[in-house]
């Protein structure tokens, strides 16, 4: 019975490692996908916010990160807004992911005291699997451009 309780505690700790479901990435990719259809057209923060059912401040914060990474350009004023700084084919999903400082799994510090060898091994193995998944994700994201996601689904 105590072994089962220990197993549940270990599993609970490992499952606490959150896989982040980040709305910033969704917002950015959705917006860039639309921009890919007409890359020269300026879009206002309000227009983008309305299309994404969010606040213009959130849009400016997220798109500002993409501007800092030279993926977007912005202009102030009446005719201002946001547009792609590169062709949609030249922007990969990995570029966006990195520009936003994304990471699929939050880093977890190994607890200083791990008295259980199973917990120790589990922590090491799961951390290794998370690293492998992140590597595969980046490979796939690097091979996919904004132009690819803007294409109509089959």
Image (cartoon, helix red, strand yellow):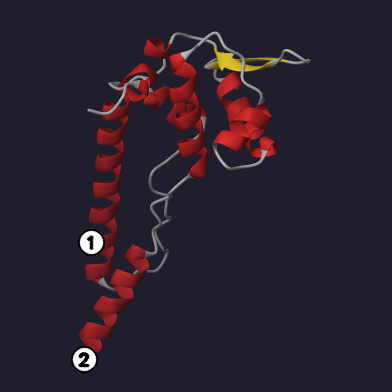
Q: Residue at x 41, y 16 (%)?
A: 91
Judge whether 131 appears above or below 68 on screen: below
Which of label 1 and label 2 is nearer to you? 2
Q: Secondary structure at mark 2?
A: loop
Q: Report whether 88 appears left or right of 85.
A: left
Residue under label 1: 121
Residue under label 2: 1
Judge whether 75 appears above or below 15 on screen: above
Image coords of residue 17 (percent x, y) = 39, 59
Q: Does residue 115 appear in the picture of this structure?
A: no
Q: Quadrant of residue 80?
A: top right
Q: Residues within 10 Å of mark 2 (few under 14, many from 20)?
A: few
Image coords of residue 117 (percent x, y) = 23, 69
- Of all residues, the one furthest to the right in this rendering is 77
Quadrant in which the C terminus is drawn: top left
Closer to the chain start, of discs 1 and 2, is 2
Q: Disc 1 to disc 2, how far (Cα)?
A: 21 Å
Image coords of residue 106 (percent x, y) = 43, 50
Is mark 1 in CB contact (under 8 Å) with mark 2?
no
Q: Nearer the viewer, residue 154 or 107?
A: 154
């Amino acid at each position: 019975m105590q072994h089962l309780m220990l197993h549940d505690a270990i599993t609970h700790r490992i499952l606490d490692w959150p896989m982040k479901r980040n709305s910033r990435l969704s917002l950015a990719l959705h917006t860039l996908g639309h921009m890919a259809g007409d890359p020269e057209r300026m879009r206002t923060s309000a227009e983008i916010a309305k299309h994404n059912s969010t606040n213009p401040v959130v849009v400016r914060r997220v798109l500002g990160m993409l501007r800092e990474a030279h993926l977007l350009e912005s202009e102030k004023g009446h005719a201002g807004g946001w547009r792609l700084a590169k062709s949609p084919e030249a922007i990969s999903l990995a570029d966006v992911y990195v520009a936003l400082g994304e990471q699929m799994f939050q880093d977890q510090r190994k607890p200083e005291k791990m008295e259980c060898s199973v917990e120790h091994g589990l922590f090491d193995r799961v951390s290794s699997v998370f690293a492998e998944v992140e590597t595969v994700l980046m490979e796939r994201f690097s091979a996919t451009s904004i132009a690819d996601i803007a294409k109509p689904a089959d």
